[in-house]
Image (tube, coloured by chain):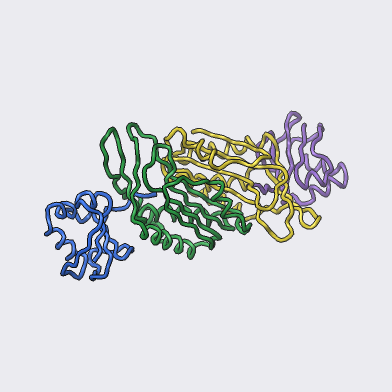
Chain colours: A purple, B blue, C green, D yellow
Amino acid sequence: MILLYFAWVRQKIGKSEESLTPPVTDVASLIAHLKSLGPNYAEAFADLNRIRVAINQRHAGLDAPVGPDDEVAFFPPVTGG
Amino acid sequence: MILLYFAWVRQKIGKSEESLTPPVTDVASLIAHLKSLGPNYAEAFADLNRIRVAINQRHAGLDAPVGPDDEVAFFPPVTGG
Amino acid sequence: MQTRIHVQHEDFDLNAEVANLTTDGEAGAVASFTGHVRKEGDLSTLTLEHYPHMTEAEITRIVSEAGTRWPLTGVTVIHRVGSLKPGDRIVLVAVASQHRHAAFQACEYLMDYLKTHAPFWKEEARSGTRHWVEHRHSDDDAAKRWNSK
Amino acid sequence: MQTRIHVQHEDFDLNAEVANLTTDGEAGAVASFTGHVRKEGDLSTLTLEHYPHMTEAEITRIVSEAGTRWPLTGVTVIHRVGSLKPGDRIVLVAVASQHRHAAFQACEYLMDYLKTHAPFWKEEARSGTRHWVEHRHSDDDAAKRWNSK
């Protein structure tokens, strides 16, 4: 699974991209797993109201399924335009 | 009174501007007077649904009062933009 | 509200006009409209006549009314007259605001009122014959929408 | 429908972009929106980050949806990324149609969805400190308006 982080999520976690194979099947359990990896992850995911998710470059919900071949991105609500 | 004609009203009447002092007090009687001046005027004012009026450079109705010092313009519905 | 109204034969520069509306840095949003002469079969020339002085006065009134309805920082209206060719630009309405919805609304309002109130007339030349463009009732309906808002 | 979507560091040329949408001569109406970095007190730099590939994919989806809702002949979306200064242009959305109301509606729709769905993030630098711009709920409300239409 490819994980991507943007904006302050990237800054809090301290990296923009990593490859992991966590034992999870949906976004919520993926986040729970990531939060267990260290305080940087725990801080990035402290308030899930401020986190948005994309799976394979499409917006997705916290209940969306994820698998080992997916590209999963975490980021704040967007502020372009 | 300064009279101005635009677009096909100008073409039908055959001039763009003239100065007259007709014995009229509103637009409707002014038009009746002009129609009496010749077939070119009569043709230009044959269908008043297709005529618009401005008095002193503001849109006005057929019942608007006019006086000797006014600039009165006749033209078709506008097609700019 | 900064206002620029021009009736001219010359074409205009969109980059310069938009830059002019944003140099003070107040507005983050500029909505613009450009009208273009369509390329239609045998249409060779579109000639625009207008009523000098009244044109500027009427556009000024329309722009002022827009300024009372929406919070705008600037409005630019440039309308060309004279002889135009298919593909040429006819009109520019550009509206700057801190709020993009206000900019869009005011820009469309200005176009709807230009179409129905500003004294311009278009004459088309096609295959050697000339005829005056007919006013469209859909433009009246578009302008009337704003009365109920 | 002709579609041009670019995410780039460079500025854009409004004259060229509008001309590109009208060269085929089909459309008489082009509605455009440009977003600009405001000049605000101590704001020195606005840096735009994005999610490459998803950005283009998401904008393409939004543009396609607009093309199903309105009769459009062309859409151009250019969004800048990287380091911008107060006064710089951030984004261009330009929509061509034979119908000006359709052009206006689609242009505003595209902006509302860009603001809420396209993966861009703005970071401001002010007096030596940097902070991420907060998403505005008014943008969510603006985008939701279109669901009921």
Q: Return the x and y of residue D113 as percentages of the image width and height.
A: 58, 45
Q: Is residue D72 above or below residue C111?
A: above
Q: Name the residue furthest top.
A: A69
Q: Does residue A62 show up? A: no
Residue B53 picture quarter: bottom left
Q: Return the x and y of residue A46 as percentages of the image width and height.
A: 79, 50
Residue shown at the point (65%, 49%) measured from the top left: D88
Q: Does residue C79 show up? A: yes
Residue shown at the point (58%, 44%) measured from the top left: D92
Q: Return the x and y of residue C17 as percentages of the image width and height.
A: 54, 50
Residue shown at the point (44%, 63%) measured from the top left: C65
Residue shown at the point (51%, 57%) measured from the top left: C75
Q: Name the residue furthest front.
A: B19
Q: Is D19 on the left or on the right of D55, as rendered?
A: left
Q: Is residue C43 above or below residue C81?
A: above
In this orientation, which residue lies closer to the viewer: C33 or D103? C33
Residue A31 picture quarter: top right
In this orientation, which residue lies closer to the viewer: A59 or B12? B12
Q: Return the x and y of residue A13 as percentages of the image width and height.
A: 83, 44
Query: The C terminus of chain C is located in which quarter?
Result: bottom left
Q: Is D34 on the left or on the right of B80, as rendered?
A: right
